[in-house]
Image: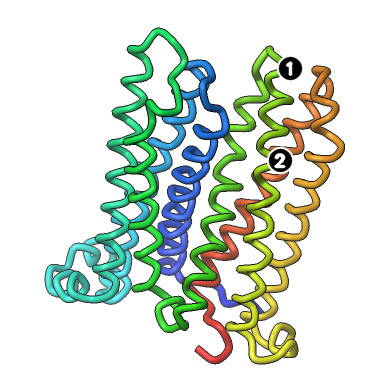
Amino acid sequence: MLMVPSTWEFLSLACKLLTYLGAASLLGALFCIWLFKNETRQVTHNILTYMTVGAFLGFQGALFGFLVQIGMVVNNGPIGMFDRGIGSIYLDSPLGDTTFFQLSGFALTFILGLTYANKIQRITSPPRLDYFRFFNTGCILAFLLLIFSFRFSGHISILSVTSKLSIAAHYSAFAAWIGSLYPLYCLSFSENLEYIQDRVKKFGDSAVALVAVLIVAGGLMVIELFDSIAEAFSTKYGQIFLIKLSLVVLILAIAAINRLRLTPRLVSKSGVVLFRQSLKVEILVALLILSITTYFSTIVGPPEH
């Protein structure tokens, strides 16, 4: 039977989910800006706005996540989140390090997104890729700060270096994939059907590499987390993992349908509508996977941990 989160645990889950979504919007936006290079200012501006909003939500998730941990210990209602004594102790703990790197990463992302979104509105022609050179460097640094924060938190902090690298690669690939879904959804409203098909096809070609990283890194994670196949069926962690695995298979199937059957049909408006509906389902499944991942890292630990 699944463990029902307490109120504090539920708040912690919500905050951590916001940080995951913020990181996904960062990497997805960066991926799409590269993918949609030299396109219209409006497309680029929409992607930058999406990234900026995601960074803002991620920052709030990291900040309130820290306060929720304090409130959970003090257990004196909302006012307990601002207990100075426990707060000062947590600032010097791995939780404080995690929060610092997350806040730094999201703050840098927010500043870059807001700055370049404003700059895009002042130029008269589509931005060239070299226009984003400093932006790309800053975003990569911001994402590295977010990835580095993982080494201090949760069950990941006690795993081997190989496992940490596998989890970082797995999460980066998944973040780039699901973080790109909303920009693709917005793209589907373009009146230029040829343009939509061309960009969706390029995304599908690039996503093949992301899926390969997901599978390889995911396999290494499974070897580290489970001593035997039986643990996947006999432990709570394993049973939730199987649910997540089923959803991953489902989202891979949806992506395959998009690539093989729906992309060729983007030459018609009816084909675009079908593709848009498929993206909605894919986004929903991605959110479920992120929610389960959040539950993993917050409530339930691997069998031996």
Q: Residue 45's x, y, as percent?
A: 44, 23
For the question of whether residue 93 can be seen, the reply is yes
Q: Amino acid at mark 2?
A: Gly
* Image height of 188 relative to 52, above or below: above
Q: Residue 181's x, y, as percent?
A: 62, 39
Task: Give the residue pinned by disc 1.
Answer: 193
* Image height of 291 relative to 200, above or below: below
Q: Quadrant of residue 153?
A: bottom left
Q: Residue 228's x, y, as percent?
A: 70, 91
Looking at the image, the residue that sits furthest to the front is 130
Task: Give the residue pinned by disc 2.
Answer: 204
* Image height of 299 relative to 134, above or below: below
User: Mark 2 against mark 1, which lies toward the viewer?
Assistant: 2
Q: Amino acid at mark 1?
A: Leu
The quadrant of the rendering that contains the N terminus is bottom right
How far apart in space, not on screen, are marks 2 and 1 (Cα)? Answer: 16 Å
Residue drawn at (31%, 66%) of the image: 98
54 with respect to 28 (left or right): left
Q: How many marks on residues?
A: 2
Residue drawn at (74%, 25%) of the image: 197
Quick one: SS at disc 2? helix
Binning the other alpha carbons within 10 Å of mark 2 as few (below 14), some (14 to 19) or many (20 upward) gives: some
Binning the other alpha carbons within 10 Å of mark 1 as few (below 14), some (14 to 19) or many (20 upward) gives: some
Residue drawn at (62%, 80%) of the image: 237
Residue drawn at (35%, 33%) of the image: 113
For the question of whether residue 5 can be seen, the reply is no
Q: Residue 233's x, y, as percent?
A: 74, 84
